Amino acid sequence: SGTSDSVTIKQYFTSANILEDSFEVSYLEAEERKPFRAVVRYRKEVKNQLPKEETVTVTLKEWESSSRPLPVESFDLTQFCTTRQHALLVARYFIKLRELVGHTIAFKTTPYGLDLAPGDFIKVETETSPYDAAKNGTIDGSGVITSASTISDGSYTIFYYPTTDNLDIQTGTLNVSGRRTTQSEFFGSIFTVQETTVSRNVYRVEQITLEEDASVSIIASEFPCNTNDASLIASGVANEALYEYT
């Protein structure tokens, strides 16, 4: 929004239009994220002469600062690239992809109102409840709360083991006042406070498949953007000072 690097978000997805239990995240292996030195071959054309093959080498300055020599990855652009500037642009793009893109997602949705094609950008809002040992605690038989971290007065959504013979984890709302609760259903239980983290990320659609059950499967790759939906890859590619050239 407002910058040349902004991407157009074609559709939004939340728990309301992502089919239940279909959302998956796949993180790239460390091997696929390792720093490298890009060696790009291109075709230099000179008037009234045969074309000559030229090579440029590019890497991130911060990658070069490591003590280990960087592995080399080669890119042959001789079929279509005829300028050094074009070759440098491609090298910086591949480097930024490696640095910034760390995962892909897959999920299912309904076909109704869907207007997407591979290459489109989507924004996906997800909620997670990361486990934090500091949020664990116990409630004794009189309602006194003991926890690893201080729990201020207020209401909290908790997962807890009740005192009954039912050992399944229960969910409830715990009201705390002066490190105590008057809710007898929680007496004698152990609990953890549930905190939900909301993430809103931009992805580029890679694949769309209509399934036999009439649902639609979508695979998309992370496309890092700032809060204005401007591409961090584009801004990184444009900043020539970030790179070493040989």
Image (cartoon, helix red, strand yellow):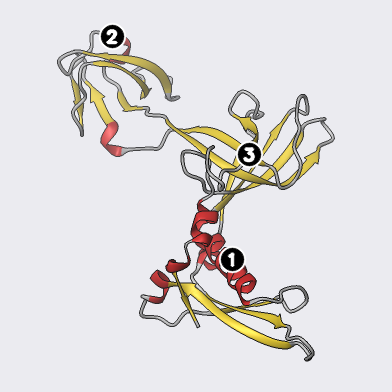
Disc 3 from disc 1: Cα separation: 22 Å
In this picture, residue 67 sits left or right of residue 98: left
In this picture, residue 132 sits left or right of residue 171: left
Point out the tag, 1 or 2, that comes first from the N-terminus. 1
Image disc number at residue 8: 3
Image disc number at residue 26: none
Kindly identify the amino acid type of the residue bearing the numbered disc 3. Answer: Thr
Going 49% across and 59% down the picture, which residue do you hit?
A: 236
Q: Mark 3 and 2 residues: CB-CB less than 8 Å, in contact?
A: no
Residue highlighted by disc 1: 94
Q: Please identify the quarter of the rendering in which residue 143 is found.
A: top left
Q: Is residue 72 above or below residue 30?
A: below
Q: Is residue 67 above or below residue 235?
A: below
Task: Check disc 1 and report its element: helix, strand or loop.
Answer: helix
| CA neighbours of label 2 inside 10 A, class few (<14), some (14 to 19), many (20+) | few
Kindly identify the amino acid type of the residue bearing the numbered disc 1. Answer: Phe
Q: Mark 3, mark 2: which one is toward the viewer?
A: 3
Task: Check disc 3 and report its element: helix, strand or loop.
Answer: loop
